Image (cartoon, grey):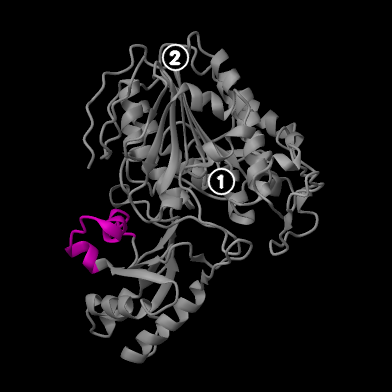
Amino acid sequence: MLGYAVAAPAQTSPRLVVNIVVSSMGANDLDRYANNFSSTGFRRLINGGQRFTNASYNYMQTTTPVSLATLTTGAMPSTHGVVADRWFDYVSNKPVSLIDDTKEQSVNYSGGSGSYSPRNLIAQTLSDALKQQHPDSHIATIAVEPLSAIVMAGHSGEVYWMESLQSSWTTSSYYSKELPKWIADYNYDDRNEDLAIKRWTPLLPYDNYLNSQVSVIEDIQSKTNKRIVHVQDTPLAKGTMDDIYYQMCYTPTGNSAMLAFARELVTRNQMGRDEVPDMLNIVLDTPRMISNRFGPESVEYEDMLYRLDRDLETFFSFLASQVESPRQLLIVLTSDHGTSPSFNSQAEPRERFNVRQAEVITNAFIGSQYGNGEWVLGYVDRAIYLNHNLIMDKGLTLEKVQNDVATFVMQLRGVSQAVTAEAMRGSYFGSGYGRKIQNGFYPRRSGDVVINLMPEWIEERDQTRSMSGSMYRYDCQVPLIIYGADCQTTLREEPIDMTSLAVAEAQILGITAPSAAEGEKITIIYK
């Protein structure tokens, strides 16, 4: 692990901490698209913050719930226990969801869209640590999806997301039995729908764009004969632009609605107005959904970033007005992961891994060895779960069956490595792919055989051109900027493990890091 000197806390502890996670943002996006950013959006942080250009996650399962848990707990998945959004219970053979909880219900004036809670989260988050040490701190977390909001928040503070029926803001009865009146009024006034884009047209003249693949943006024209590639393999049902929840997921509307609601949260709760530090966590899910659907090479993804940049310009100015001094504001910008190149990129088409086919033929292989049966419970995020009850009934050893499966799946096209749960329990992988897989292994929840796909391979899913979830640089490396709170404007090139971020923020706040945090402390350079 990296050893850094420990810096003293900032001379003036921030009164308002704002964590912004731009889901699926690539490590080089801030540089690639910089010429079309405004001077006070992303560039306000780039030019005025402490920017880390070599920040990354050191495990394979670079998916949104796993990495959000890492960001907020300061721990590896092997410690915080979030290995996917679901897994299989080896006793009941039934799937278990990370946030589903029938004891709770969604709280909303118009009816809910699910029953969720953080009860399956086992490690303390930064929000939990702040609330424990400063009970009067006001903490809020918002996202489009409940999974993102709940994992980022943990067990503390106000937590809100958009219910899928009307995109109204809601929460779980775990956090609150009813919505504040102002949020109920906000929903009633359809404030989110007021921001909807009914026709998605480019923000800038097309010749300013670097990307050329277009799926749904209209009125794309080039005055310089720049090549435009119309992608026809991303089916979108007619009328979806009239679906407000679709708007939140697959157009820049989602980002605009998030930041507008964030401003209301700060204002209504007077965050940053007293001596006790407050925290606002914002997970922008929309960039990930747009990147997955249209690809990171698309004009849709690029245009979304430019529109987000303008929204951040307004948001940052608003945040600055909420504190008496710039020293009292801390903004952290990062991402939960990057994303793969599109599998059907015009430049170099790639193949995909057929999950269902892998399940069927793996089950058939085990059946040919030991008799017919439901040997494979399922496949979740590159992990194969086996039927432990059936293996015991047949008098077989779990290790033997796992080894057989690992050997077999190595023959499947697209599979680069396969490691068994028994190997991860009994061995120590000091480096390489084995170490990254082991860092993401949590025995009670991880699968029996974890596979790594070849570079740039993704799983085959409908309407998905790009995905995260690998150990490769395009997924593991992310942008990271710490801005404000007396932090000096500096370009930092040393390697930073993302488990260190929660530790660094706790250091700046002058509080103890989350209890399970294992990241090394970073030297924060102050003015």
Q: Residue at x 44, y 83 (%)?
A: 361
Residue drawn at (29%, 53%), measured in percent from left and top?
Answer: 439
Whether residue 431 appears in magenta in the rendering, the answer is: yes
- Would you place residue 351 above or below residue 141 in this image? below
Query: Dividing the image into 4 quarters, which one contains the C terminus?
Result: top left
Query: Is residue 153 visible in this depiction of the protein?
Result: yes
**What is the x, y in percent for residue 356?**
51, 75
Of helix, strand and loop, which one carries label 1? loop
Name the mark nearer the viewer: 1 or 2.
Answer: 2
Give the magenta part as a residue range.
422-445
Residue 214 location (% of width, % of height): 71, 53
Q: Amino acid at mark 1?
A: Glu
- Single out the residue that lies furthest toward the top: 324
| Residue drawn at x 37%, y 88% as measured from the top left | 367
Q: Can the viewer see residue 165?
A: no
| Foreground residue among 149 and 63 | 63
- Along the line of sight, the residue nearer the viewer: 24 or 249: 24
- Quickly name the residue at label 2: 328
Looking at the picture, does residue 284 appear above or below residue 211?
above
Q: Kindly identify which residue carries mark 1.
A: 145
